[in-house]
Image (cartoon, rainbow, N blue to C red):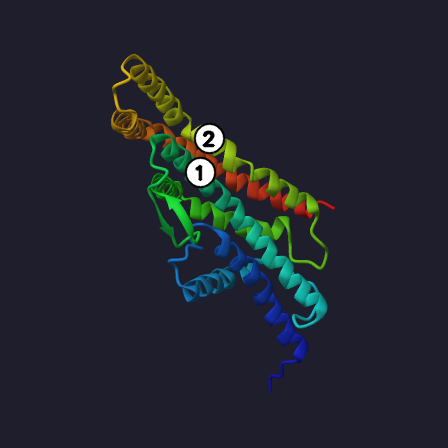
Amino acid sequence: MITITSQQWYAWIAAFLWPFLRVFGLILAEPVFGNRAVPIAAKVGLAAFITLLLAPVLPPMPPAEPASGAGVLIGIQQLLIGLAMGFTVRIALTAAETAGQLAGLQMGLGFAVFFDPQTSAQTAVVGQFVGLFAVLIFLSINGHALVLSALSESFSVLPIATSTLSPRGWRVLVDWGGAIFYSGLLIALPVIGALLIANITVGIMTRAAPQLNLFAVGFPITLATGFVVLYLVVPYVAPALAALFEQAVLTMGRVLESMATP
């Protein structure tokens, strides 16, 4: 008769639960898998499926019961690691949306906003458009596969253990958050530069002919110029977004390595 001890049950539960929390944290924060349009049941099922594939090749688990204090701390730690990994990729997508919002403000479409269920806030139309374009670029370069590959390697770089995480990893993540501003500005710079020239031209026209209505003349010019420049820079924005997402995956590895550094 085969008998299973309680220690064996705890070991099996820990071998699934702790990796599951890291995978689930990544799925919650990652922009594609964690989209609010995806039902929570699908996210849990996907996390469980990925965990079942990874569990047989993972390093040995620490000798701690899942329901003990040390086991709960390990679970919280794994969830935070997954959230940090997913948040790294989300920052890159937010930078693309910021570029669209900056371009939309310069075009005069700052008032054209709608409720975005993903962020639960009002989002500019141009920003949402650039964000969707960035998601398509992310999928076209197999970004989801790169993220899953980084996830599997994370268990070797930062194995499940009772040791605490180094604060250096969080510092790297905070520094990467600056990409929202400088990357967004660089991506939107062609549109901003063209619209600056258009606004200067409109200003000179209204100065030379004061009878011209600034809103009746300037708004259509800036709007048309913005759309034309957006159309022209799309082939150049796509490689920039691809490089941004590749940099996000590399930053994910640096975050994990910094967390593992004592």
Question: Does residue 63 appear anywhere in the picture?
Answer: no
Identity of the residue drawn at 50% across and 48% down? 149
Identity of the residue drawn at 39% across and 22% down? 193
**Three-letter amino acid code of the residue under disc 2:** Leu
Question: Does residue 83 appear anywhere in the picture?
Answer: yes
Mark 2 to mark 1: distance in Å? 8 Å
**Three-letter amino acid code of the residue under disc 1:** Thr
Q: Are marks 2 and 1 in contact (CB under 8 Å)?
A: yes
Q: Quadrant of residue 211?
A: top left
Q: Quadrant of residue 19?
A: bottom right
Q: Residues within 10 Å of mark 1 (few under 14, many from 20)?
A: many
- Percent across and percent down for residue 46 are 44, 61
**Disc nearer the start of the sequence (2/1):** 1
Indicate which disc residue 185 carries: 2
- Percent across and percent down for residue 207 are 32, 15
Q: Residues within 10 Å of mark 2 (few under 14, many from 20)?
A: many
- Percent across and percent down for residue 25 are 54, 57
Identity of the residue drawn at 66% across and 62% down? 74
